[in-house]
């Protein structure tokens, strides 16, 4: 074997060894989903609410109620395509008004066809699911996230969280008096024009 061939063979052996070591260091980490609706300040009817479920995490401990290290679904999981995010909007009597999709989405208020068309108190819930249940997903460092049923949680592939703080929608903002003053010149102009038209009609 020539020196060049020996050099190539050594390079392939080193690359294979590195590949094996990387594979060996990767692990499947089991845990559960923890959905988070976020917190929202009061808005005026007619405003848009930016719903953000990026507080949702993958918890590294499969036992429900036992917190472990967490990874943000938005900032830690590299591919969200296996996940479904469904927002539910309820009125003050907890009657369902409708659904919105996606981890972050804009909810308009006050318009025709909007889920919220009047001022009041509303509640949000966010359901995060991984489907199908056998799916895995990539975690930082080359690890793989997965879910397994436990005695405490028969379906760790899904979690629904209701907002702890109600979404308050106030009546539409009333224009300030300063805004009305901007219309004053136009009102004066229209009044003068009407007077002139009346004078012409009387003179004729």
Image: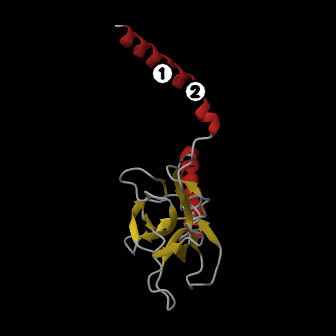
Q: Nearer the viewer, residue 159 or 193?
A: 193
Residue 14, given in percent of the width and then of the height, sits at 59, 57
**Residue indicated by mark 2:** 184
Position of 150 relative to 20 (above/below): below
Residue 72, given in percent of the width and then of the height, sits at 59, 64
Residue 34, given in percent of the width and then of the height, sits at 55, 73
Coloring scheme used: secondary structure
Structural distance between the alpha carbons of marks 2 and 1: 10 Å
Residue 191, given in percent of the width and then of the height, sits at 49, 22
Callout 2: helix, strand or loop?
helix
Q: Tell me if mark 2 has few (under 14), some (14-19) or many (20+) residues whose alpha carbon lies within 10 angstroms of its own.
A: few
Q: Quadrant of residue 129?
A: bottom left
Q: Tell me if mark 1 has few (under 14), some (14-19) or many (20+) residues whose alpha carbon lies within 10 angstroms of its own.
A: few
Residue extending furthest toward the bottom: 151
Mark 1 or mark 2, which is nearer the start of the sequence? Answer: 2
**Residue indicated by mark 1:** 190
Left or right, 72 with reference to 85: right
Residue extending furthest toward the top: 204
Q: Quadrant of residue 142?
A: bottom right
Callout 1: helix, strand or loop?
helix
Total residue callouts: 2
Q: What residue do we see at 62% from left, 84% from top?
A: 66
Locate the C terminus by quadrant: top left
Q: Which mark is residue 17?
A: none
Q: Nearer the viewer, residue 51 or 165?
A: 165
Q: What residue do we see at 55% from left, 28% from top?
A: 183
Position of 31 relative to 128 (above/below): below
Q: Nearer the viewer, residue 45 or 197?
A: 197
Q: What residue do we see at 45% from left, 74% from top?
A: 94
Left or right, 200 with reference to 140: left
- Is the residue under label 1 in contact with that under label 2 (CB below 8 Å)? no
């Amino acid at each position: 074997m020539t020196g060049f061939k020996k050099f190539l063979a050594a390079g392939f052996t080193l690359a294979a060894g590195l590949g094996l070591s990387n594979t060996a260091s990767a692990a499947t980490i089991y845990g559960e989903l923890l959905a988070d609706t976020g917190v929202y300040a009061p808005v005026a009817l007619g405003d848009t609410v930016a719903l953000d479920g990026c507080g949702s995490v993958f918890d590294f401990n499969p036992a429900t109620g036992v917190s472990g290290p967490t990874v943000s679904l938005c900032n830690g999981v590299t591919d969200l395509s296996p996940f479904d995010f469904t927002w539910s909007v309820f009125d003050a009597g907890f009657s369902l008004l409708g659904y919105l999709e996606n981890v972050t989405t804009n909810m308009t208020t006050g318009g025709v066809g909007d889920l919220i068309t009047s001022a009041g108190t509303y509640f949000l819930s966010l359901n995060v699911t991984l489907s199908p249940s056998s799916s895995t997903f990539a975690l930082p460092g080359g690890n793989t996230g997965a879910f397994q049923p436990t005695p405490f949680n028969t379906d760790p592939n899904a979690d629904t969280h209701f907002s702890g703080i109600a979404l308050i929608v106030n009546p539409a903002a009333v224009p300030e008096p300063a805004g009305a003053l901007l219309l004053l010149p136009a009102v004066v102009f229209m009044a003068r024009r009407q007077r002139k038209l009346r004078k012409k009609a009387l003179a004729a």
